[in-house]
Image (cartoon, helix red, strand yellow):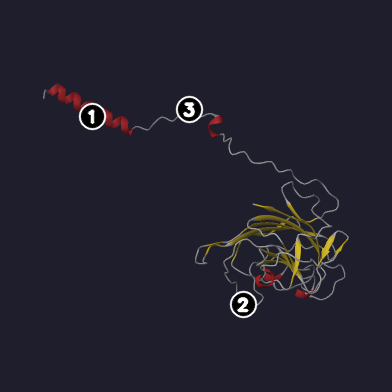
């Protein structure tokens, strides 16, 4: 091979390698380069202002209204508040009285929704008795069981000390609320809950715990809190694999009122 030919070949090879290693020139960027047009979020109409709710608004357009102040047909009474007491109970009478647009817990039964849920956004308003009786856990006690298993505590904690992981805003016996934003006894209070259900494998092992964010009276009390398992009165959380579950409102011997209950499936 001639020297000139060899030189040309080496030059061409070196040039090709240099070009291969050179950074590629990116296309010119414009404001439109980073715009994403699909998918388009669906439209949900917010609730309207209402003087008859503690939150000040009615439910949004895609909410499932569980109690509107009159109709208790989406609930059924059950004995107790463990899964054994409500599983399979989807029809029957709702025995809690409805007065002045509110449901009131009645001794002898809790109530659960006929419909069951997975991930959701929940709004609920509650009122502990204005006539204060008892103290600690014996004062304005009730609870909301998410998927019928994990209790969000309701309690009159206005100037009423009790153990921290059992006060209002706690995931009972598991997660202490960040603050105590309780209103006075007899005043309507709000819970706004974002809940994501736990995930289990085929062997019943928990892959991801349930997580919950809760605002009480518009103030953050649980921030993406992991739920370790069932909320036991005695002992520690139990991991019990499950699918969808109901909301359950607990009777704990105190006449606690509930109104403006709605839920959005996520």
Which residue bears the numbered disc 2? 235
Residue 212, x across and y down, in percent: 64, 59
Q: Residue at x 27, y 32 (%)?
A: 17
The crowding category of the residue bearing disc 3, from other C-alpha atoms within 10 Å (few below 14, some 14 to 19, many at least 20), is few
The quarter of the picture where the N terminus appears is top left
- Circle nearer the N terminus (1, 2): 1
| Disc 3 to disc 1, C-alpha distance | 30 Å
Q: Indicate left or right for 52 with 81 as reference.
A: right
Residue 46, x across and y down, in percent: 75, 45
Dot 2: element: loop
The vertical placement of 262 against 233, above or below, is: above
In front here: 260 or 29?
Answer: 260
Q: Residue at x 59, y 39 (%)?
A: 39
- Circle nearer the N terminus (3, 1): 1
| Disc 1 to disc 2, C-alpha distance | 75 Å
Dot 3: element: loop
Which residue bears the numbered disc 3? 28
Rendering quarter of residue 44: top right
Dot 1: element: helix
Residue 77, x across and y down, in percent: 76, 68
Q: Indicate left or right for 68 with 163 as reference.
A: right
Which residue bears the numbered disc 1? 13
The vertical placement of 198 against 50, above or below, is: below
Q: Residue at x 31, y 32 (%)?
A: 20
Q: Is residue 163 visible?
A: yes
What is the number of callouts on the image?
Answer: 3
Question: In this rendering, which labeled residue sits more in front, label 2 or label 3?
Answer: 2
């Amino acid at each position: 091979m001639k020297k000139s030919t060899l030189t040309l070949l080496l030059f061409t090879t070196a040039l090709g390698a240099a070009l291969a290693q050179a950074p590629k020139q990116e296309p010119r960027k414009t404001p439109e380069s980073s715009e994403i047009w699909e998918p388009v979020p669906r439209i949900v109409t917010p609730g309207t202002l209402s003087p008859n709710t503690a939150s000040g608004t009615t439910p949004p357009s895609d909410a499932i209204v569980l109690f509107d102040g009159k109709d208790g047909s989406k609930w059924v009474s059950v004995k107790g508040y463990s899964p054994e007491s409500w599983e399979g109970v989807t029809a029957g009478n709702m025995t809690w009285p409805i007065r002045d647009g509110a449901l009131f817990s009645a001794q002898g039964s809790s109530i659960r929704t006929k419909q069951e849920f997975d991930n959701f956004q929940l709004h609920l308003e509650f009122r502990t008795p204005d006539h204060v009786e008892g103290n600690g856990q014996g004062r304005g006690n009730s609870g909301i069981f998410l998927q019928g298993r994990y209790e969000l505590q309701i309690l009159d904690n206005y100037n009423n000390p009790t153990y921290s992981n059992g006060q209002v805003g706690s995931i009972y016996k598991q997660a202490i609320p960040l603050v105590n934003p309780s209103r006075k006894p007899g005043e309507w209070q709000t819970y706004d809950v974002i809940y994501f259900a736990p995930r289990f494998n085929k062997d019943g092992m928990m892959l991801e715990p349930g997580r919950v964010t809760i605002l009480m009276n518009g103030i953050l009390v649980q921030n993406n809190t992991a739920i370790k398992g069932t909320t036991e009165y005695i002992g520690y959380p139990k991991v019990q694999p499950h699918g969808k579950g109901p909301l359950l409102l607990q009777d704990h011997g105190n006449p606690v009122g509930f109104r403006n209950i709605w839920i959005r499936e996520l």
